[in-house]
Image: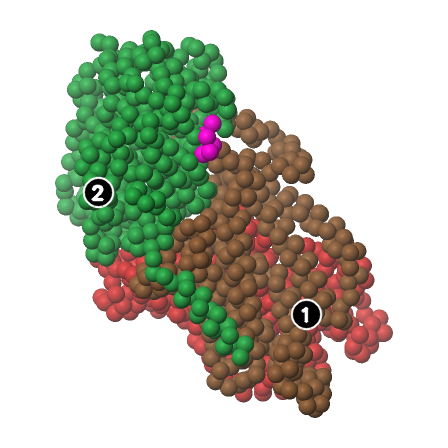
Chain colours: A brown, B red, C green
C-alpha cells in the first residue's frame, strides 16, 4: 500500500513537470503580453516593467528560472495584481472554491445515491422514469442557464436567499451556488448508481442472499449498495474536473471570491504567473483526488490489491 | 474534462458494456430488435433524424439569413413581422440563427467525436493488442493526461490561437479520446484471446492486419454507445466555452452562444433563451436516449 | 427511508437558510455603511501602479491631491488651498493647507515632490507615468537619462510647492486630481518600500482609509478622523466589490445587497428604468467610440473612400436603437461638455437624411473607382467586448448597403489594441476615454508625433501645426479656437469616423443621497449619505 502511494507520488512529479511545461509555453505563445493595455505604454516604461519581472530575458532562461522558483516553492509575483504574490492569491482565494466544491460533491453524492437506489428498486415504474427524466434534464441544461433562473426565481422574486456575494461564507450565500454546482453531478451520480444497483441486484450472490431469506433492507443496504458504489468511486476524479468547470461559471455569476473566477481573466490578461499557479494548484488537486479514489476503490473492492 | 460530464470516464464502467458485442452476428440482430422495441431510443432516433435534417437543409429554407441585420425588426417577439421565433437586438431572425446554431453545434459534436474516435481507437487497440510493457506505458500516459485540468488547457488553447471553429473541434476532440482509448483497450484485451484472432494469428497474419481487420471491427458495439454519449458532451463543452466568451465567434452562432446570450437578456426577451435551450435539451436528450437504448440492447444484462 | 431523511435534511437546511434578510456584512450600531459595486478588483492600492477608472474611484476616497473632485466632478481645492500661475503659464505655485496623514504626520510639499519623482522613476515602473510628461524634465527622468532632482518640482517651504512645466497647461488643476498626481506618504514609502500600500498599514490623507482587501471579495475602508473635513463626512464604512458580472450586480442592487453599481449593460437600461424606477443614472462621459482607417492601406489614402464609409454609418440606429443606454450619435470627435471648449462644427452631411447620405456615399465610392463590378472589400478588426460586438455587425450591414463588402475580425481588447498599434488592420474599432477633462486629451490622438497611438497614421501638417500652437498658447480662449479648428480639419478629412459618445451608467439606490451624475464619472464617497440622515445635507455640501 505504501509502495503504491510512493509510486503514484513518483509519477506525479513528471506529470506536474509536463503540466508546467505545456502551460508555460502555451501561455507565452499567446499573442500580446501582460503589459499590453488599451493605452500605450511608452517604450521606456515598458522596458522598465519588463526588466522588473525578468520578461526581457530569452524565453528558455525564463523557463528555467521559473522551474527553479517552483521547486523552491516560489510561484512569483502576479503581473497584474502588483502588490500580491501568486501564493498569496491562491491562499486568499482557495477557500470559497473548496467549500463550494466539497459541499456540492457531498450533496450530489448523497442525493444522487439516494435517488439512484430508489430508481433501481422501482425499476421501470413511474418513480424510476421520474428520477431518470430529471437526471437527464440535469445533465442537459448548462449551469449558466440554471444559475440565473434560480437567482431570478428564488432570490429576486421570492427573496429567500441572497442573489450573489460571499459575505464571509454565510450559509445563505452558499445555498444557491452549491445547488447549481451539484445539480449536474446529482444527475450523473443517480444514473450511475441506478445502473450499478440494477446490475448487482440481478447477480448471483444477491439471489443467494435472497434465497437465504435475508431481509430486503439488509440486502440492499449492505451487500448491493456496497458493490454498486464501486463505479461511483472511480467517478470521483472526473467529477472533480466537472466541478472545476462548473465553478468557473458559478463563481462568476454569484460573484464569489474563488479561484475559478480568476483563471479566465488571468489568461485573457496574460497574467502568466497567476495562470501557471492555478494550473499547478488544480493539477496537484486532481492528482491527489485520483490517488484517494484508487485507495477508496481498493478498500471497497476486495478483489483489487494495490501493488 | 467533459466526456465525464455525461459519461463517467470510469475505468471499470467500460467493462460492463463489452461483454456482449463479441458473440457473433446473430447477436447484432437481437440487439437491433431490442433497440427497436425500446420506445425511448426509437423516439430519440426519430427526433434526432428530424434535427439533423433541419440542421442540414434548414438554413437554406429559412426566410432570413442567420446574420442579416434587420434594423426595423429589433427585439421582435415570436410571430411578429414574420419572425416565427422572434428577433434579437440586431433584428436578426431567431429561427435562422437557431437552425445555423444547431448545424454548428451538431458539426462540432460530430467532428470532435470523430477526432477523439480516431485517436482513441488507435491508441487503445494498439495498447490492448500489443500488451506488456507497451500497454503499461501507453495506459500510464493516458492516466497522466487524465489528471490534467483539461478545461484549463482548452481555455489556454483558445487564448493562444484565438477561438476559431477548427480549433474547437481539435481541442475538445483531443480531450475526449482518453476514455475512448480505455474502453477500446479493455475490449481488445478480451478479444485478443478469442478463437478467431488466434486463428488469424496461426494463419500468419501480421499484427497490424489483425488489429485492422479483426479487432477494430469487433469493437464497434461499445464504441458506438460511447460515441452517442460523447457527442452531447462535446456540445455541452462548447457551450461552456461560449459562455466564457471563447466559443464560436459571432456573427456565427452555436446553440451555446445563443443560450449564453439569451441568458443575459432573459427578462427582456425570454424567447432568446427559451428556444435555444429547448433545442439544446431535446438534442442532448435524444442522444442520451439512443445511447442508453444502444447500451441496453447490446448488453441485455442491464434490463 | 433514506430518501425521506435526505429530503427532510435538505428542507431543514433550506428553511434555516432562508431568513429573508438582506445579506451584507454587519454594520456597527449607529454607523453608516455603504456597499459599492466597483466592477473590478484594484490591481494595486498604490496610485503609482494602478491605471483603471475603478482603481481611481477607490483611491480618491483615500488620497487627495493638490485638487480634488467636487460632487459634480469639477476640480476644487484639495491639499492646495490656492494656486498662482506665472504670466507665461509655465510656473505654478501651490499653497498647501494644514493637512495630516492618517497616522498624524503632516502632509507637506515634500510629500508631493517625493511622489512626482517616484512615479517617474524607472524603478517604480509605473504604467501611467507618461501623463506627467508636461512637467519640466519629466520625460528625461522617466527614461533614466536625468537624475530625479532635475525634475522641475520643488518645495519652497513645508507648505509651498513650485511646479515648472514644459509648456502651458491650463488643464493642470484637472490633472492634479488624477491618481497619478496623488501624494504618497513619504515617511511610509521610505520605511516600507513597495509594501507601504499593504492594507494593514495603509496611510491616507483623505476622508477614508483602506483597512482590508480580500481579493475577489471586497476592499473595506473606514473613516479617517484626521481628514481636515472629517466633521462633514457622513459615511463611516465603505465596501468596494469587484462586480465583474454586471447583471448579477444589478440584482444585488435591487435586493439591497449593494447600494450602487458603477456599470449597467447598455441594452438593459430601458428595461431597468421600468423594473427599478429611480435607480438608473446616466450622463455623457468623456469618451468616444470611433473607427480608425489605416492610411497605410492604399484604399484609405483616398479621402473620398473614408468620407463615404463615415457617411454611411447609421449612428442614430446604433446609439438609440441598438445600445439604447443614452449614448449620443457622434459626428464630432470631442464629446460635448468638455471644459473650456465649445466644440467644432459637425460636417455638413451630418444633418442630411440618411438616404441622402447613402446616395452621396455611393457617388463618392463610384468616383474613387468602386462599384458593383469592383466592390470595395475591407476588414474591420474589433474588440470582443459587449458594445463593439453589437455595433460592428450593424456597421457591416450599413456598409453592405453602399456596396462595401466588410469582414469582421474579433479580438480581445488588449490584443486588438496591440494590433492597431502595429498597424495590423484595415479598419479598427477603437475608443478613447480621456484621462483629464480637456479637448487636447482627445485631439492629440491624430497628431503625427503621437506615433503608435495614432492608429491610422493620419498625417496633416496643418493639423499638427494647430495643435502645437495650442500647446504653446497661454490664453485659454485662443487655445480653444486652435483646437476647434484642428478638430474641424480632422472631421473634414474623415481621418477617423466617430460613431457614438460614451455615456456613464450607474445603478444607484434611491436610499443614497449626495450622488450626482457627472461628466468624469467620479463620485467621492465623502459626499454620500443615506436619505433622511441628519448629516446628509452637510456631506452633500462637501
Q: Taking A206 as reference, is A261 above or below it? A: above
Find the magenta span and give its range: C196-201
Q: Secondary structure at mark 1?
A: loop
Rendered residue at 64%/61% (across/down): B178
Q: Taking C8 as reference, is C22 above or below it? A: above
Q: Is residue B146 left or right of residue C428?
A: right
Q: Residues within 10 Å of mark 1 (few under 14, many from 20)?
A: some
Q: Which mark is residue A119?
A: none
Magenta residue check for C396: no
Of all residues, the one furthest to the front in this rendering is: C29
Res. C341 image quadrant: top left
Q: Residues within 10 Å of mark 2 (few under 14, many from 20)?
A: few
The residue wearing badge 1 is: B12
Res. B98 image quadrant: bottom left
The residue wearing badge 2 is: C533
Q: Nearer the viewer, residue A39 or C238?
A: C238
Q: Is residue C12 left or right of residue A26?
A: left
Q: Taking C393 as reference, is B299 above or below it? A: below
Query: Where is residue B2 shown, x and y percent of the image?
Result: 55, 61
Q: Quadrant of the C terminus of chain C?
A: top left
Q: Taking C23 as reference, is C118 above or below it? A: above
Rendered residue at 52%/69% (across/down): A186
Observer able to see residue B270: yes
The residues tagged by marks 2 and 1 sit, at their Cα atoms, a distance apart of 67 Å
Q: Are marks 2 and 1 in contact (CB under 8 Å)?
A: no
Rendered residue at 26%/31% (across/down): C231
Q: Nearer the viewer, residue C27 or B39?
A: C27
Amino acid at each position: 500500500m505504501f509502495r503504491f502511494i510512493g509510486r503514484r507520488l513518483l509519477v506525479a512529479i513528471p506529470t506536474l513537470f509536463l503540466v508546467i511545461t505545456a502551460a508555460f509555453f502555451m501561455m507565452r505563445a499567446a499573442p500580446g503580453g501582460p503589459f499590453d493595455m488599451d493605452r500605450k505604454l511608452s517604450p521606456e516604461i515598458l522596458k522598465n516593467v519588463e526588466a522588473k519581472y525578468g520578461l526581457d530575458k530569452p524565453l528558455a532562461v525564463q523557463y528555467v528560472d521559473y522551474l527553479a522558483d517552483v521547486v523552491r516553492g516560489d510561484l512569483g509575483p502576479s503581473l497584474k495584481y502588483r502588490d500580491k504574490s501568486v501564493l498569496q492569491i491562491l491562499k486568499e482565494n482557495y477557500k470559497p472554491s473548496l467549500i463550494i466544491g466539497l459541499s456540492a460533491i457531498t450533496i450530489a453524492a448523497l442525493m444522487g445515491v439516494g435517488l439512484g437506489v430508489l430508481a433501481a428498486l422501482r425499476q421501470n415504474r413511474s418513480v424510476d422514469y421520474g428520477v431518470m427524466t430529471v437526471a437527464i434534464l440535469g445533465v442537459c441544461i448548462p449551469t449558466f442557464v440554471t444559475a440565473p433562473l434560480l437567482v431570478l426565481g428564488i432570490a429576486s422574486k421570492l427573496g429567500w436567499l441572497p442573489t450573489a456575494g460571499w459575505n464571509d461564507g454565510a450559509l445563505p450565500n452558499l445555498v444557491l451556488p452549491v445547488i447549481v454546482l451539484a445539480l449536474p453531478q446529482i444527475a450523473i451520480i443517480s444514473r450511475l448508481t441506478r445502473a450499478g444497483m440494477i446490475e448487482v441486484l440481478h447477480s448471483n450472490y444477491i439471489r443467494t442472499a435472497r434465497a437465504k431469506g435475508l431481509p430486503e433492507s439488509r440486502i440492499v443496504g449492505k451487500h448491493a449498495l456496497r458493490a454498486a458504489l464501486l463505479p461511483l468511486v472511480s467517478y470521483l476524479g472526473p467529477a472533480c474536473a466537472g466541478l472545476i468547470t462548473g465553478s468557473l461559471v458559478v463563481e462568476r455569476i454569484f460573484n464569489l471570491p474563488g479561484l475559478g473566477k480568476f483563471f479566465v481573466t488571468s489568461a485573457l490578461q496574460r497574467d502568466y504567473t497567476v495562470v501557471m499557479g492555478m494550473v499547478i494548484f488544480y493539477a496537484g488537486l486532481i492528482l491527489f483526488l485520483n490517488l484517494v479514489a484508487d485507495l477508496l476503490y481498493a478498500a471497497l473492492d476486495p478483489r483489487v490489491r494495490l501493488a | 474534462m467533459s466526456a465525464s460530464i455525461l459519461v463517467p470516464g470510469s475505468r471499470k464502467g467500460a467493462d460492463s458494456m463489452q461483454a456482449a458485442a463479441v458473440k457473433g452476428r446473430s447477436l447484432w440482430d437481437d440487439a437491433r430488435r431490442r433497440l427497436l422495441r425500446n420506445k425511448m431510443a426509437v423516439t430519440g432516433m426519430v427526433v434526432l433524424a428530424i434535427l439533423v435534417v433541419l440542421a442540414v437543409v434548414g438554413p437554406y429554407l429559412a426566410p432570413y439569413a442567420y446574420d442579416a441585420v434587420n434594423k426595423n425588426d429589433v427585439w421582435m417577439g415570436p410571430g411578429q413581422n414574420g419572425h416565427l421565433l422572434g428577433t434579437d437586438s440586431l433584428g436578426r431572425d431567431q429561427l435562422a440563427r437557431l437552425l445555423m446554431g444547431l448545424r454548428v453545434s451538431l458539426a462540432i459534436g460530430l467532428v470532435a467525436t470523430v477526432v477523439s474516435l480516431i485517436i482513441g481507437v488507435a491508441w487503445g487497440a494498439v495498447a490492448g493488442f500489443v500488451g506488456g510493457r507497451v500497454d503499461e506505458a501507453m495506459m500510464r500516459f493516458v492516466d497522466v493526461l487524465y489528471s490534467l485540468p483539461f478545461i484549463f488547457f482548452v481555455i489556454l488553447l483558445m487564448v493562444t490561437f484565438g477561438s476559431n471553429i477548427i480549433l474547437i473541434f481539435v481541442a475538445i476532440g483531443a480531450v475526449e479520446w482518453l476514455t475512448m482509448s480505455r474502453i477500446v483497450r479493455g475490449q481488445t484485451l478480451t478479444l485478443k484471446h478469442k478463437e478467431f484472432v488466434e486463428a488469424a494469428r496461426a494463419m500468419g497474419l501480421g499484427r497490424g492486419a489483425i488489429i485492422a481487420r479483426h479487432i477494430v471491427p469487433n469493437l464497434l458495439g461499445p464504441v458506438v454507445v460511447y460515441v452517442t454519449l460523447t457527442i452531447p458532451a462535446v456540445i455541452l463543452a462548447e457551450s461552456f466555452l461560449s459562455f466564457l466568451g471563447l466559443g464560436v465567434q459571432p456573427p456565427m452562432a452555436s446553440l451555446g452562444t445563443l443560450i449564453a446570450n439569451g441568458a443575459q437578456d432573459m427578462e427582456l426577451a425570454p424567447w432568446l433563451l427559451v428556444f435555444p435551450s429547448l433545442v439544446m435539451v431535446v438534442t442532448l436528450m435524444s442522444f442520451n436516449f439512443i445511447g442508453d437504448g444502444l447500451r441496453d440492447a447490446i448488453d441485455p444484462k442491464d434490463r | 427511508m433514506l430518501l425521506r431523511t435526505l429530503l427532510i435534511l435538505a428542507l431543514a437546511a433550506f428553511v434555516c437558510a432562508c431568513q429573508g434578510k438582506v445579506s451584507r456584512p454587519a454594520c456597527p450600531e449607529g454607523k453608516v455603511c455603504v456597499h459599492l459595486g466597483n466592477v473590478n478588483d484594484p490591481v494595486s492600492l498604490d496610485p503609482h501602479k494602478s491605471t483603471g477608472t475603478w482603481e481611481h474611484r477607490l483611491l480618491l476616497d483615500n488620497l487627495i491631491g493638490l485638487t480634488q473632485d467636487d460632487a459634480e466632478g469639477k476640480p476644487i481645492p484639495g491639499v492646495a488651498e490656492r494656486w498662482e500661475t506665472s504670466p507665461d503659464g509655465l510656473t505654478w505655485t501651490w499653497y498647501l493647507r494644514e493637512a495630516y496623514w492618517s497616522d498624524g504626520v503632516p502632509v507637506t510639499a515634500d510629500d508631493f515632490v517625493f511622489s512626482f519623482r517616484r512615479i517617474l522613476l524607472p524603478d517604480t515602473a509605473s504604467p501611467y507615468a507618461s501623463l506627467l510628461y508636461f512637467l519640466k524634465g519629466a520625460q528625461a527622468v522617466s527614461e533614466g537619462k536625468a537624475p530625479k532632482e532635475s525634475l522641475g518640482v520643488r518645495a519652497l517651504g513645508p507648505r509651498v510647492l513650485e511646479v515648472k512645466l514644459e509648456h502651458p497647461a491650463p488643464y493642470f488643476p484637472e490633472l492634479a486630481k488624477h491618481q497619478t498626481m496623488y501624494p504618497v506618504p513619504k515617511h511610509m514609502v521610505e520605511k516600507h518600500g513597495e509594501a507601504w500600500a499593504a492594507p494593514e498599514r495603509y496611510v491616507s490623507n483623505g476622508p477614508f482609509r483602506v483597512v482590508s482587501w480580500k481579493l475577489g471579495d471586497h476592499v473595506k475602508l473606514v473613516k479617517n478622523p484626521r481628514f481636515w473635513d472629517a466633521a462633514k463626512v457622513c459615511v463611516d464604512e465603505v465596501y468596494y466589490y469587484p462586480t465583474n458580472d454586471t447583471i448579477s450586480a444589478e440584482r444585488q442592487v435591487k435586493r439591497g445587497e449593494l447600494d450602487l453599481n458603477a456599470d449597467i449593460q447598455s441594452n438593459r437600461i430601458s428595461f431597468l428604468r421600468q423594473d427599478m424606477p429611480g435607480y438608473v443614472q446616466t450622463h455623457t462621459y468623456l469618451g468616444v467610440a470611433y473607427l480608425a482607417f489605416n492610411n497605410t492601406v492604399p484604399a484609405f489614402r483616398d479621402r473620398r473612400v473614408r468620407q463615404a464609409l463615415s457617411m454611411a454609418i447609421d449612428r442614430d440606429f446604433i446609439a438609440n436603437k441598438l445600445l439604447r443606454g443614452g449614448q449620443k450619435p457622434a459626428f464630432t470627435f470631442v464629446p460635448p461638455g468638455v471644459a473650456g471648449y465649445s466644440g467644432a462644427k459637425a460636417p455638413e452631411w451630418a444633418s442630411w437624411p440618411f438616404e441622402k447620405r447613402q446616395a452621396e456615399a455611393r457617388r463618392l465610392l463610384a468616383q474613387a473607382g468602386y462599384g458593383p463590378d469592383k466592390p470595395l472589400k475591407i476588414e474591420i478588426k474589433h474588440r470582443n467586448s459587449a458594445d463593439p460586438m453589437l455595433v460592428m455587425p450593424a456597421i457591416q450591414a450599413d456598409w453592405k448597403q453602399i456596396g462595401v463588402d466588410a469582414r469582421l475580425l474579433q479580438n480581445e481588447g488588449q490584443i486588438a489594441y496591440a494590433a492597431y498599434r502595429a498597424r495590423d488592420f484595415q479598419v479598427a474599432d477603437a475608443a478613447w476615454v480621456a484621462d483629464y477633462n480637456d479637448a487636447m486629451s482627445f485631439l492629440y490622438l491624430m497628431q503625427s508625433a503621437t506615433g503608435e497611438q495614432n492608429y491610422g497614421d493620419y498625417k496633416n501638417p496643418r493639423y499638427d501645426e494647430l495643435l502645437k500652437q495650442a500647446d504653446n498658447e497661454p490664453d485659454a480662449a485662443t487655445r480653444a479656437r486652435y483646437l476647434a479648428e484642428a478638430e474641424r480639419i480632422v472631421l473634414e478629412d474623415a481621418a477617423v469616423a466617430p460613431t457614438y459618445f460614451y455615456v456613464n451608467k450607474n445603478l444607484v439606490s434611491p436610499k443614497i443621497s449626495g450622488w450626482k451624475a457627472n461628466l468624469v464619472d467620479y463620485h467621492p464617497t465623502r459626499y454620500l449619505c443615506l436619505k433622511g440622515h441628519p448629516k446628509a445635507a452637510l456631506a452633500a455640501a462637501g
